Image (tube, rainbow, N blue to C red):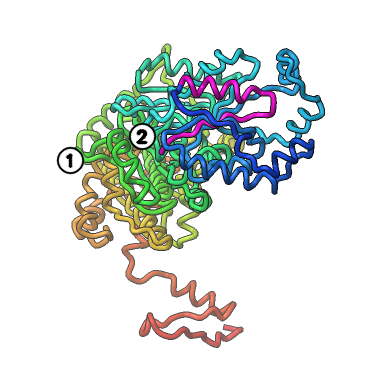
Amino acid sequence: MAVTYIIMGVSGSGKTTVGTLLAQQLSLPFYDADAFHSEANVAKMAAGIPLTDEDRLPWLQALQTAMGTWTEGAVLACSALKESYRRVLAEGHDVVWVYLKGSFKTILQRMEARNHFMKPELLQSQFDVLEPPSYGLHVEVSLPPQQLVSEIITNLGTMNTSAFGIIGMGVMGRSLAQNVVGHGFSLSVYNRWTEAEKDVIPSFLSKLNHPKLQGFTNLSAFVQSLTSPRKILLMIPAGSAVDTVLAEITPLLHPGDILMDGGNSHYKDTQRREKAMKDHGFHYMGLGISGGEQGALTGPSLMAGGASEAYQYIKAILESIAAKDIENQPCVSLLGTDGCGHYVKTLHNGIEYAEMQLLAEIYALLKPSLSYNEMAALFSEWNEGELQSFLLETTIRILRTKEHDGYVLDTILDVAQSKGTGAWSSHSALEQGIPANILMEAVMARAISSQKQQRSQLAQLLAPTPFSATIDTETLKQAYQFARILNHLQGLGLIQATAKAEGWELDIAEVVRIWSRGCILQSALLQQLYPLLQQTPNLWEEAPLVVQLSQKETAITEILLQAMEQRTPTPCLSAAYQYWLGMTKGNSAANLIQAQRDAFGAHTFKRIDDPEGESFTHQWNPHG
Ligand code: 6PG
């Protein structure tokens, strides 16, 4: 589509001069919007009567129609002071707005210098109606016209050239940007301009020094630097910042453009935003990104949610930058619609919380008998086999890290922080009524850790923990794997239940495949679970897996007994054991719960001989 460059601004800002020069430089025809007024409007203006919005509408519509006939593009000088006028003009056209901006004083002085007479009151009335655009190129009228035009040309030179855009140059944004450019895609990056962040873009550009990379602190110039449909990834903190950026960017976009949120957003926020963006004609995708800084740089795991129509446009880029699984397939997938990708990322983190807590419990159990070096050596052995994982490797690295004469780990306060995804996972389990007690205990363990002062006081009241026997590391290894399998089983089960409730056609095997490399959860266990899930989405139906778990029952029991003797809290190991016990009891004690509910509140119960049938209530004797 041919582009119309509309030079806008108040009377006296130099639209005609600048527009004529620009048209010459771009070898395009120049038009002055004033020439399109009806005779009635001309007569009114000649009589000094200001035009109303009703007078202007047919004029704007005539211009809009004329623009459709300017097949090679054009430069148009038009005041277009109000947003509503600009909407009429731009309808169905590719328009680049150039706003000649200047203060009242500057424009008045400029006109006086040119002997162009305009009463200050008239100029003031223009400023009164002016609604400066939050988009387009903004250029200062105080510059000499030639210089002003060359600034416009320079900025236009960056237009429609980048295949992808990233907003937010924090650690993750920078690493992803480097990954995108490293895979040969042209990229524009944007970071807002603040005094504190003023060096972010210049230093990133000079660090990468790549011909296909452009940096911006002006949002409209950033948007205009992208090819259509625009593909923009937001790498900004989850929460209100996302809504703020969406409000700023939507007036700059065209229908069909694609926005992606790469943060850890709550999936219900993503659903809400997707709906709102759809109403504007834009695509919105929630993109879960895992792998931390290193993953973002060398290959993250990417969990996408949104419309397949939009995904087709970003698939090639995402597949290039993603990690590759053992079959060399990219660890990225469109998992479902709207918030599905963000939900899966949330549960990835929920499982991550429990995996981290399990390692912390093992570290606590081993601490009385092994040095950090010995522990690291043991974990390295484990890491050679079925227990291999990124988190285990990270723990080994931590156990070996020294500063001066001591271990860094010993300098870190034992209060675990969190940003919310563990709590959201727990909340989702409660909402769906699906067991996820292992990850919930991990969230609670962080909450208990934050009661530092109270813990320290209470610890002083109690006698020191008595000596206990050394933990058998082979037994511990079995117990650890037992808990890990159950943790994954719970997390995946919760994803499946929510997907069903939300109407996402999610393939759970695909989730496990894209987690097998690149993300924080990547592990040999996920590689082991993938073929099983391809056969059945219900892992409890995998007989060999259940046998494997039952063979580890003795180990987990022994470890929990020893943990109690040591007075070492093991919430996640215990939760895994309790879950296993609960799931493997054909007859539970829940009949008593039902009886109690019925006895005090006539809440009814089902009978053993007709589980799917009628509900009954019993006339319980009040005196027993
Ligand atoms: C990842 C991580 C990442 C981040 C967690 C930490 O997958 O790359 O999960 O998203 O490390 O959000 O979460 P907490 O601060 O809540 O522990």
State the residue in front, 410 or 501. 501
Q: Position of residue 222 (x, y in %)?
A: 48, 29
User: Which of the two labelled residues, at mark 1 and mark 2, occupies the earlier sequence position?
Assistant: 2
Q: Residues within 10 Å of mark 1 (few under 14, many from 20)?
A: few
Type of amino acid at the residue the image marks with label 2: Gly
* Ligand 1 has an atom within 8 Å of the beta carbon of the residue at disc 2: yes
Rendered-image quadrant of the N terminus = top left
Relative vertical location of residue 620 with respect to residue 277 in this rendering, above or below: below
Q: Secondary structure at mark 1?
A: loop
Location of residue 97 by image quarter: top right
Q: Amino acid at mark 1?
A: Glu
Report the residue marked by disc 1: 327
469 magenta-colored: no
Q: Which span is picked out in magenta?
A: 1-25
Residue drawn 45% across and 45% down?
Answer: 442
Q: Residues within 10 Å of mark 2 (few under 14, many from 20)?
A: many
Residue tagged by mark 2?
Answer: 291
Q: Decide whether residue 2 is among the magenta residues.
A: yes
Q: Say if 155 sits above or below 332 in the image.
A: above
Q: Is residue 9 visible?
A: yes
Q: How many marks?
A: 2
Badge 1 residue CB within 8 Å of ligand 1: no
- Spatial CA distance of label 1 from label 2 is 19 Å
Answer whether residue 370 is visible to the viewer in this image.
Answer: no
578 above or below 528? Answer: below
Image coords of residue 156 (percent x, y): 46, 24
Residue at horizontal 42%, vertical 25%?
A: 174
